[in-house]
Amino acid sequence: MSETEFPLPRGLADRLRDILVDADYTVSGVRDRLGDAAAKALAREQLVPALRATGGEERLGLLLRLWWLQAPIPARAARSILPVDELAETGLVTVEEGPDGPAVRALVHLGPWELEDGRPGFVVSDPKVRPGSGAVPGNDHVVGAGGASANLSRLIVDGPFERALDLGTGCGVQALHLASRAREVVATDLNPRAVRLAGISLALSGVTGARLAQGSLFEPVRDERFDLIVSNPPFVITPESARFTYRESDLPGDTVCAELVRQAPAHLTEGGWAQFLANWTHTDGDDWADRVGGWITGTGCSGWVVQRDVQDPAEYVELWLRDSCEHGTPEYTRRYDAWLDYFDREGIKGIGFGWISLRNDVAQDATVKVEELRHEVEQPVGPYLPDVVDGAMTAHRLTDAALLSAHVALVPGVVEERVAVPGAPDPEKIVLRQREGLRRVARIGTVEAALASVCDGTMPVGPLLDAIAELMGEDPALLRERTPEALRTLISEGFFRVAR
């Protein structure tokens, strides 16, 4: 393990940031300059429309061609807006002879980012290796912020926190998100190049309260504790040793995700959170939910595991071979075949992707909620995620007797829907639907529907059930006996909350 200083002099970082902001090299500025057509073409890996949209020697166009599109720009024009020699000394650009004279070429991708407080920030990574270029990323390649980064950032619970850790920081994008939530941020990575580029991202974004360290998993912070830990780990499941450090570890299968979950509680303060993206295997004779939930059981943490997607082995292999730009290369078929052989040997029938969130409740009766949510949910998840875990924990702890004496209220944003044949005296189906948050749907019976119509937290559940029994001509004792389990599930899933 080693501590790392910021690799960009503060004075140079401040000057470059001022240049970028003054030129409107921001998320909105880049979007407006490129326009919809060029942006859509870039999503298809087509550069020509974007190059046309950024032509000429106007500052923003030059910066976009250099840092975003990775196109050399004339040295004369570059020197008119950038401290080229100082940037070359730090390895961010190089000056080379081009067909039309000296040109400046970027050695990194520098993209605009929007910080949590709305200020402009910047993320520095290795240049994107585009399909069809004939190039393959190096082992120490540092990827930029993408879809997975955005998923994790929307999952992070709100602060404020005293200390936060970005484990496996990569280009530093999560550390930027943590900077607005925590007084002190620590960012670590096994890859020394990732630590360096993350440091440049933080420096350019004006983040000064962060510490950088190089090392594997929790080694760089062996004896430290944090209020918040986040990680987008190298979770790709592959038969080979770590080919690309940004996505694969040397641990077999989904072990790296299991190890993160098992080790995290020792590094959390009481009440602290750990939040990860993860992959896990689906195998013959093995329930993924029981196995992944088992990673958390016994840690003293409440947990919420959500499976957002499942891919079959062929889909999974194709995704990651595309990611490494190996389609069309001689290695493609060999690696594809070897990968499927590995999945066959291990009995892997599918690979799940999702979220894992832990809260260190230091409780023997801490509960773990494991579920699959494929539908769209309200984003960001972080602001209401603690309520999800609280609901599951409360439902787990409530005995039937405690539930009957509890004051329960319908959660705001929950509506009732009934499906019935016109003119029929009774509905065929009654459901509760969440218009906010996780947007779950629960099919309920007439008793639960009656409770939903009257539960406002002012009366205990037991007397309400007695009144419902009288109106329905039911035995109150039977309703008190059979209703708590259904109501407990509805509390766990966020349709009801215990008022007091």
Image: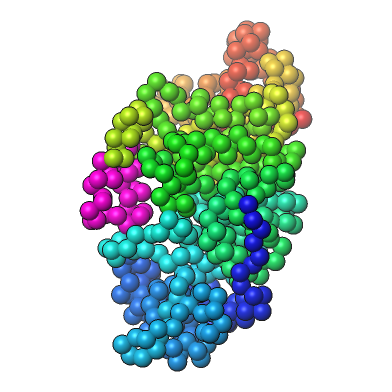
Picture quadrant where residue 359 is located: top right
Residue 460 appears in view: yes
Q: Residue at x 63, y 46 (%)?
A: 219
Viewport quadrant of the C terminus: top right
In this view of the protein, which residue sits in the foreground, 444 or 293?
A: 293
Residue stretch in magenta: 312-337
Image location of residue 273, percent across then percent down: 67, 42
In this view of the protein, which residue sits in the foreground, 170 or 290?
A: 170
Q: Is residue 176 left or right of residue 171?
A: right
Image location of residue 205, percent across then percent down: 62, 69
Q: Residue at x 58, y 24 (%)?
A: 489
Image location of residue 39, percent across then percent down: 38, 68
Picture quadrant where residue 48 is located: bottom left
Residue 306 appears in view: no
Total numbered circles? 0
Image location of residue 451, percent across then percent down: 63, 24
> With respect to residue 141, does 73 lie above or below?
below
Q: Is residue 245 left or right of residue 20?
A: left
